[in-house]
Image (spheres, helix red, strand yellow):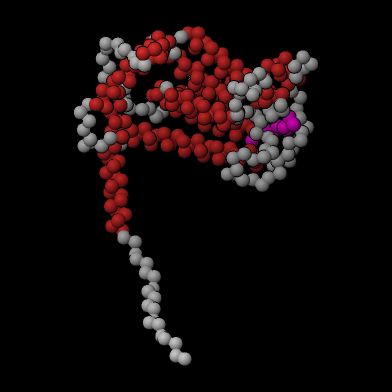
Amino acid sequence: MHMPTCPQRRHLEARYEPTNSFSFLVIISILLQQWHDRITPEMAVYAVKSIRDLLFMGIELLTENTMIQVISSLEHNRTPLRDVAEEYLSDANRTFVEFAYIGEDTYQVNTNTVLFLWIFYCFLHGTNGLKVLQKGVRCLTLARALRVITFSITILPNPNPKCNFTGPIDPFNLSPGGACNDLLYSGHVIVYTISALAVTILCASYPCALLRLFIRLFIWIQVIQRMIRAVVEFHHYSVDMFLGLCVTLLIWHADILYYDLPSLPKPLYPHLKALILTHDYNDNGTIDYYVNQLILIYQQFKRQPIKTLKNFLKDRSISLLPQKVHSKQI
């Protein structure tokens, strides 16, 4: 029996066309055009300086993480030093210990959450908040860089004798388990202090003096609570926490933090409008009108927050004061 023959299939070889360099040039040209149309020179300078400071902070944190593991892997006497402050805090009455654990399950959060809340709180306060945030980034970088020097030149045994780092050393391991000798001074208290300073400065614009006092007492009491907990839980010696607080406060007032500090251009609104909208977009002044209304509401809320909120909850509207605020002022 003769089987019918199928027509021979023609298999085409895969073809790899060479990359068209012209398409890359077109993409680059489009990106440059968008940059020219949307990013003003002032905003570009601010972005470059901000990226520079963040890059320095990233290099410092990577170096610090490496040195923590290197120092913790060196041979040393592991007998804990006597901490007189810890003995006093952990006395029979344990009054300070009980104070330190107030709010543990409610308002006390971990260090990563503190960092997030610090950044978020600064963003909520606009240009002033961003200035405080930029200064805080520099303070954090310098304080932690000095910390690397102090715990590297003198190795202190961990307050917990069972702490033992076994490696391996991995610079990109952001939470090396068992790293024991990054003690003098505490990196956690740097974060707590900078966050408390930011809240203390930014809440100064709040209209109610009692509210300002409450916020400042609340945030600094939390700093003290966290310092006590770190000592009584044998994460740090008391000298680590005390020096970390003092060094951070001193660096915060150093003139070097203001050198070439990134600052948002003023007025800010035209730069943001150019970033969001294209030049050929014509809204007939609608956006400017609504921005002016929001500014009026914000200013009225700053002067009389309770009255403004009551009026809004009652009438679902806010009667704006008869004053003119131009968007070019922000």
- Across and down, in percent, residue 144 comes to 56, 31
Residue 212 appears in the picture as rendered: yes
- Across and down, in percent, residue 90 comes to 75, 19
The residue lying at 27 percent from left, 17 percent from top is 325
For residue 6, side relative to residue 236 (left or right):
left
Residue 42: say if magenta. Answer: no
The residue lying at 36 percent from left, 27 percent from top is 264
User: Which stretch is magenta?
Assistant: 152-160
Query: Eyeballing the image, is 167 above or below 241?
Result: below
The residue lying at 60 percent from left, 29 percent from top is 110
Residue lying farthest bottom?
1
- Across and down, in percent, residue 227 comes to 64, 22
For residue 85, side relative to residue 185 (left or right):
right
Residue 301 appears in the picture as rendered: no
For residue 56, side relative to residue 48 (left or right):
right
For residue 294, side relative to residue 254 (left or right):
left
Which residue is at the front of the view, 81 or 298? 298
Query: Eyeballing the image, is 37 above or below 80?
Result: below
The residue lying at 46 percent from left, 9 percent from top is 208
When asked about the image quadrant of residue 229, the answer is top right
Query: Eyeballing the image, is 30 above or below 323?
Result: below
Quadrant that contains the C terminus: top left
